[in-house]
Amino acid sequence: MKHFLQSLLQLILSPRNGWEDIEKAAVPPGRLLGQGLFPLMALAAVSVYAQAAWHHHVLYMKLFMEMIVTFVVYFISYFFSTFVLSLTSVVADNPTPDEDERAQTFVIYTLGLLSLITIIVNILPVSALVLFFLPLYVALVQWKGCGYLAIPPERQGGFMIVAVCGVLVPPYIFYFVFSIIF
């Protein structure tokens, strides 16, 4: 998890250099999932309980349900986003294993950044304005990932539409849907 968190920090501080370092490290997506994203998703889910420190009238059963929903949302988002990128022309028609792994890695790091945002929001009493701008920064990090995925400059606009709609937005939509259900 140490390498995963270092890469996330590098993406936050310098997105272009972060993607270059991720490319050089060439860590397989399965390892990133098991040793990076899944534990970070679990930490984001457990961080829901930090809200009890700011809101003293919170019901712990409600927090428990919110914890489950948070983990399930990110878990489903990983598979949905990977599926969306595999269906689009972002990855070649007959993707090589390397291109497919890069797309998975792109999704893993994007969801990792969103998980960090969730942890920050749960631990600190931040305003709605900050909540609006943090995902926009994740979109900037995604845009800098075009070089990592070898997206030609003329296709970067279409890629960003797919990346934002297929990777960045689904966790928020899934969270809204699950919040209504539960």
Image (spheres, rainbow, N blue to C red):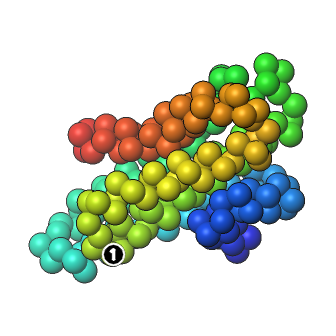
Q: Is residue 35 visible?
A: no
Give me the residue at 51% from left, 38% from top: 164
Hey, which quadrant is residue 5 in on the image? bottom right
Q: Say left or right for 49 vs 114.
A: left
Give me the residue at 59% from left, 65% from top: 12
Q: Say left or right for 28 vs 106.
A: right
Q: Is residue 124 visible?
A: yes
Q: Which residue extends farthest top?
A: 93
Q: Which residue extends farthest front?
A: 154
* Number of numbered markers: 1
Q: Position of residue 119 (x, y in %)?
A: 43, 68
Q: Where is the C terminus found, in terms of image quarters?
A: top left
For mark 1, what is the residue?
Answer: 124
Secondary structure state at the residue bearing disc 1: loop
Q: Position of residue 69 (x, y in %)?
A: 37, 50
Residue type (three-letter) at the residue carrying disc 1:
Leu
Hey, which quadrant is residue 39 in on the image? bottom right
- Viewer-proximal residue, 37 or 91? 91
